[in-house]
Image (cartoon, grey):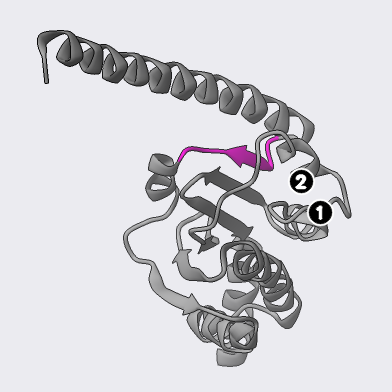
Amino acid sequence: LSDTEYMGFCTDITEQKQMQSVLAQHEDEIREAYGSVLDAVTAGKLSLIDADSVNQVMGENAIGPFKVGAFDALASSRSFIRESIASVGFCQKLTEQILIATGEAITNGVKHGGACEVTVEFTPEDDASLRVMVADTGRGIDFATLPKATLVPGFSTMRSLGMGFTIMLDLCRKVFLSTGDTGTTIVLEFECSNELARSELESLGSVV
């Protein structure tokens, strides 16, 4: 390259990097604004997070991942979740709620991402909770349709979650959502402290 061509090449690279930086900043601003709105509208039940924050939501003792590569593997994913929580002793009602909510997330992961991975984690602290993470590597949810995709029942596009997301919000204590060009990750959190108390009382009753 001549000096002129080299300078022009460097200028193009610099401009591209500046443009990428501006776009990334703009996306972060949109994400933050949407996050505030979704948090307010759902009374804190829905949190929009970035990809780096997903690992902070899930702990280190998770079971999985279980890979779901097609719709015919949905039954196997239900069995994986059921077996992962079997030792906790949830009642049938809560177990079914967990399977319904996670089933919606898994179905969307396969539909919009082509495949997904499921990870289960139970934390038996005072505020006991169960978290199920469903992650895909699809194109993510378009920010232009994100509010409708997460809040409007029945709304659906090829990259939305439609009615399934409404069901998740109804059955879960909290839903964490991370979405972008590299995929979508949903973490469903279920409150289990009452279930643990029930199980302990039943155990004491059987002993007496």
Q: CA distance from mark 2 to mark 1?
A: 7 Å
Q: Residue 199, position in %: x, y?
A: 60, 77
Does residue 20 appear in this view? yes
Q: Which numbered disc covers residue 132?
A: none
Relative depth, front residue between 114 and 29? 114
Q: The N terminus appears in which quarter of the rendering? A: top left
Element under label 2?
helix
Q: How many marks?
A: 2
Relative depth, front residue between 173 and 101? 101
81 shown above or below 38: below
Q: Residue 106, position in %: x, y?
A: 62, 69
Element under label 1?
loop
Relative depth, front residue between 58 and 164? 164
Relative depth, front residue between 84 and 103? 103
Amino acid under disc 2: Ala
Question: Image point 61% across, 39% down: which residue?
Answer: 47
Left or right placement of residue 87 versus residue 73 in this view: left
170 shown above or below 200: above
Which residue is under mark 1? Answer: 156
Tag 2–tag 1 contact (CB < 8 Å)? yes
21 shown above or below 50: above
Q: Residue 66, position in %: x, y?
A: 45, 77
Which residue is under mark 2? Answer: 149
Q: Residues within 10 Å of mark 1 (few under 14, many from 20)?
A: some
Q: Residue 161, position in %: x, y?
A: 73, 55
Left or right placement of residue 11 versus residue 52 in this view: left
Question: Image point 38% across, 41% down: which residue?
Answer: 52
Q: Residues within 10 Å of mark 2 (few under 14, many from 20)?
A: many
Residues in magenta, as a range: 44-50
Left or right placement of residue 136 versus residue 3 in this view: right
Magenta region includes residue 85: no
